[in-house]
Image (cartoon, rainbow, N blue to C red):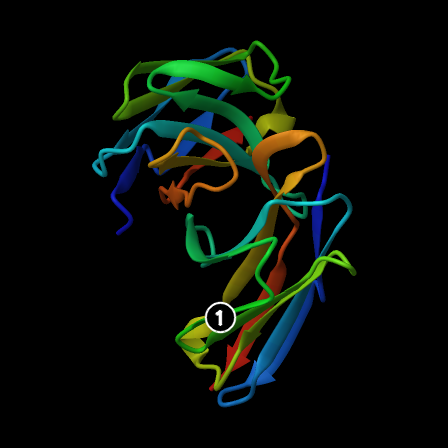
Amino acid sequence: SQQGEEDPQALSIQEGENATMNCSYKTSINNLQWYRQNSGRGLVHLILIRSNEREKHSGRLRVTLDTSKKSSSLLITASRAADTASYFCATDGGGTDKLIFGTGTRLQVFP
Amino acid sequence: ETGVTQTPRHLVMGMTNKKSLKCEQHLGHNAMYWYKQSAKKPLELMFVYNFKEQTENNSVPSRFSPECPNSSHLFLHLHTLQPEDSALYLCASSQGEGTSTDTQYFGPGTRLTVL
């Protein structure tokens, strides 16, 4: 069953702009993770945020979590062409302790 | 590189063939996973192994048969597949017990085409 759903499905921006992606989920969670996938490659872990945390930073990445709205956002500041990839949120919950991935947001950053 | 390798990277097979996908992790992790990624669909968890024991089988058809001889190696044996099984098959590993708090490290995937 799908737990996380990303929005928008696709996003195109210019280098230097900020990119914001959102993830909504259905049931309560213990943690939420964000991953990046370059075209045709494996996923790379970006950040994990626990249900008792509201915000985490890692370099140019900022993740927020609002458990009351069952949503999370990933902000990439000062984007670069190398940030072009698909971004996935993954959560537990919904009766499983395994990660369930969403369908992803495809980000295109134009130089 | 993430420390997780997969072979082959590309595979084309007929519906009557038998083939195997191989995954190896060089990270000393305990848990290993198989995922299926099809176009426009969420990543689907297929199997989870923790210390060589299968802890999750996500209602996967029996034409997919996993094997985990040790914590570093994971295989996916394929037989009598269907064209709808064409997808990118991803292997991952993690330090923990295969639960949602683990950070997973993914291999590059095997692009499978079933004719």
Q: Please tell me which residue is depicted at 56% across the width and 33% down the height of the picture.
A: A98
* Residue on which disc 1 sits: A84
The chain holding disc 1 is A
Question: Is there any visible trace of residue A23 in the rendered image?
Answer: no
Q: Residues within 10 Å of mark 1 (few under 14, many from 20)?
A: many
Q: Residue at x 60, y 45 (%)?
A: A30
Across and down, in percent, residue A26 comes to 78, 46
Amino acid found under the numbered disc labelled 1: Thr
* Residue B28 in sight in this render: yes
Q: Is residue B86 above or below residue B74?
A: below
Q: Considering the image in quadrants, where does the N terminus of chain A appear?
A: top right
In x, y percent, where is residue B100?
Answer: 52, 39
Residue at left offset 61%, top offset 14%: B61
- Compare residues A87 and A34 and report the one nearer the observer: A34
Q: Is residue A78 above or below residue A25?
A: below
Q: Judge by depth and name the residue closer to the eye, A58 or B27.
A: A58
Residue B29 picture quarter: top left
The answer to which image quadrant residue B50 occupies is top left
In the image, farthest residue toward the front = A52
Q: Secondary structure at mark 1?
A: loop
Q: In the picture provided, is B21 more to the left or to the right than B58? A: left
Image spot of residue B75 (x, y percent):
36, 20
Residue lying at the far bottom of the rendered structure:
A16
- Pick whichever, B71 or A39, lies toward us: B71
